[in-house]
Amino acid sequence: MFEKILIANRGEIACRVIKTARRMGIATVAVHSDADAHALHVRMADEAVHIGPAPASQSYIVIERILEALRATGAQAVHPGYGFLSERADFAAALAAEGVAFIGPPVGAIEAMGDKITSKKLAAEAGVSTVPGFMGLIDDAEHAARIASEIGYPVMSKASAGGGGKGMRIGWDEAEAVTIAAEIGFPVMLKASAGGGGKGMRIAHSREEVEEGFRLAR
């Protein structure tokens, strides 16, 4: 049993972890940015450590800031909550190097499930049903165009490595799809919104690849 844990998150998830830890007799450490100095999770925790400016990119997802908070408080484990550093294998590895427990999956599991191709192959090997589709990397623009020609319309666009909360969006024609792809940022995933006959999702790395995919699919 840990005597003290640090919650590398904020808001409702941090509050829930603190409540559970309190019931278990475990002391808690909250971390906060400038903007969250008076937040509920900060007031609820036994200790609180300031980790940087308001932008999460300068506070909550800076691994070294979390490690500094750990060293200052002597917490024995970290609960990552969800989002932020919860799916970062390098964060879990950094904690292990410090002799601090990561309350979550092992590094190998995070690495495997963080890659869409690897995780899909692992799921299939375990007997889990998966959507049929291309199970590899796209080599170049011509390869992307050939795959895109099989999809059909409309297509769904999604940032392949996460879009910062932008989610998936539908392009009903070539012009709209190109505009959406540019807003999301390349590369993007292209998928028929009503199903593509088992063709799965495809990657477009540029505006030209999106346009070419639409032209070839007509």
Image (spheres, helix red, strand yellow):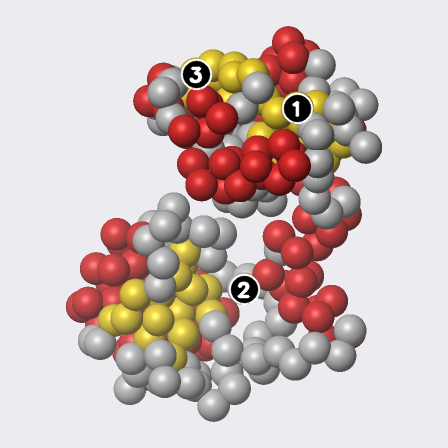
Q: Which mark is residue 105?
A: none
Determine the residue positioned at 65% across, 17% down.
70
**Residue depth check, mark 2 versus mark 3: number of the one nearer the observer:** 3
Of label 1 and label 2, which has the lower sequence position?
1
Residue 4 in sight from this viewpoint: yes
What is the secondary structure assignment of the residue under circle 1? strand
* Tag 1 residue: 27
Q: Residues within 10 Å of mark 2 (few under 14, many from 20)?
A: some
* Tag 3 residue: 52
> Residue farthest to the left?
175
Q: CA distance from mark 1 to mark 3?
A: 23 Å
Is disc 1 in contact with disc 3, using a CB cutoff of under 8 Å? no
Q: Quadrant of residue 141?
A: bottom left
Task: Check the picture and name the quadrant holding the C terminus.
Answer: bottom left
Q: Is 87 displayed left or right of 202 in the figure?
A: right
Q: CA distance from mark 2 to mark 3?
A: 39 Å
Q: Residues within 10 Å of mark 3 (few under 14, many from 20)?
A: some
Judge by depth and name the residue closer to the eye, 66 or 129.
Answer: 66
Judge by depth and name the residue closer to the eye, 199 or 82.
Answer: 82
Identified by mark 2, the residue type is Ile
Judge by depth and name the residue closer to the eye, 156 or 12.
Answer: 12
Q: Which mark is residue 138?
A: 2
